[in-house]
Image (cartoon, grey):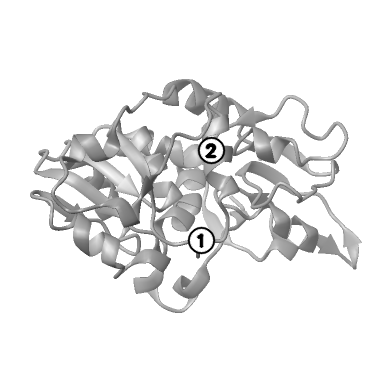
Amino acid sequence: MRPIRLYWWQGEGEHDAGRRNFGDYLSPLIVGMVSRRPVEYSPVEKADLLAIGTILKRQRKARRFLLPRRLHIWGSGAGDSDERFPSRHYYHAVRGRHTLACIDGDGGREVALGDPGLLVAEYWSGRRRPDRRHSLGVIPHFVDQGSAAVETLLQIRGARLINVFAPIDEVLSDVLSCAFVVSSSLHGLIVSDALGVPNRRLVISRNIRSDLKFADYYSAFGLAEPPALEGASIRGNEGPEDLVGDYRKRDVDGLCAGLLRAFPPF
């Protein structure tokens, strides 16, 4: 059985297993689970599929003998509303409505919406749910690690730091052990939604490459992006439920069903 040639953003994790951002590395995990086929990393030039991540702009590298070639797209997203994507690709699913609007012509017809990272609940299915030992999970994007806002949040009784460079199973177990989550990592929010843990976006720095990706993710549910928690406003004596505020449950099951139906027929 030929492996699916998948492109995902490796970052520093290409050479250092301790620097693998779990959100990016969800892509081979979820694609392998859904397809029940082996998955191997491939540069875009040779890839069959782009899935999880703000990586859709890399489609322009998909060429053979200097000529454009077609890719299968399943859940990838745009990083900026000005990006444009050609209709020649096979668009099975994209992350949200903002990405959908960036596809030229009729390429965006009958495309499922949602980030495939939401399927982690299916991946975890059948395992024992960890005891809820922590009042608050704090998931800083790797650019926010070590920030003053994170240190202040960890002063809250029962707070738990969740490292985005930890193995995926460890991240999921940690999220499940928390009553609430605040995260400046998009996939920290996505897996919290998938696992039923109330959460809120945390804004610490403006060094994250894309703000659009957050609005794009929520748009798949038909929601406007909820107001974020500003790191500069945190004192360290708040209750976790007050930090998260009015959490609105998402229709995760509906999006997951659509993503599963839309998986490419390799």
Q: Left or right: where does residue 121 sit relative to residue 129? A: right
x 55%, y 60%: residue:
40
Mark earlier in primary sequence (1, 2): 1
Which residue is situated farthest in the bottom direction here?
15
Whether residue 124 is visible, yes or no, is: yes
- 10 Å crowding of disc 1: few (<14), some (14-19), many (20+): some
Label 1 sits on a secondary structure element that is loop
Residue under label 2: 217
**Hey, which quadrant is residue 134 in on the image?**
top left
x 85%, y 63%: residue:
64
Position of residue 254 measured from the top left corner of the image (x, y, whole percent): 49, 20
- Which residue type does callout 1 highlight? Ile
Vertical comparison of 221 with 83: above or below: above
Q: Left or right: where does residue 19 sit relative to residue 62? A: left
- The span from disc 1 to disc 2 (Cα, nearest Å) is 15 Å
- Which residue type does callout 2 highlight? Tyr
- Which disc is residue 208 wearing? 1
